[in-house]
Amino acid sequence: MGKRRTNQEWQTLIEQSESSSLSTLAFCKLKEINPSTFYAKRQQLNKIAISQGFVKAEVIEKTTKYQAQIATANMTLIVKCHEKDAKY
């Protein structure tokens, strides 16, 4: 019979698996975990997290929005057109 683990230990293993470059099967083999047990526990913990109304979120990239205001001049543009130069 395999080692009994707490939900926190399983959560840690799941997080390690997700951040690992190994496939889930390779990770389970390395940690000597039955893959079926791993998948079942992962699903169980996901259901618990959803039913509690909280979802674990991870910040992947921080972005900052900048807003610039361009100063505009308050002026009036007058265009004079001499009749001899005007083309209608």
Image: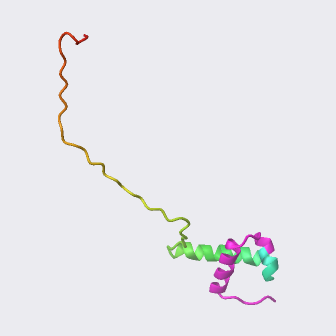
Q: Position of residue 50 (x, y in %)?
A: 55, 72
Give the side of residue 77 with respect to residue 5, left or right.
left
Give the side of residue 68 with respect to residue 1, left or right.
left
Residue 51 makes an appearance in the image: yes
Q: What secondary structure characterizes most of the magenta part?
A: helix
Assess whether residue 11 is covered by the magenta stretch. yes
Image quarter of residue 45:
bottom right
Assess whether residue 19 is covered by the magenta stretch. yes
Image quadrant for the C terminus?
A: top left
Query: What residue sits 53% from the left and 72% below the top?
Result: 55
Image quarter of residue 80:
top left
Which of 78/22 is in front? 78
Query: What residue sits 36% from the left and 55% below the top?
Result: 67
Residue 34 makes an appearance in the image: no
Magenta-drawn segment: 1-26
Give the side of residue 26 with respect to residue 51, left or right.
right
Query: Residue 66, relative to residue 34: is it above or below?
Result: above
Image quadrant for the N terminus?
A: bottom right
Q: Position of residue 11 (x, y in %)?
A: 64, 80
Query: What residue sits 56% from the left and 66% below the top?
Result: 60
Q: Position of residue 33 (x, y in %)?
A: 78, 81
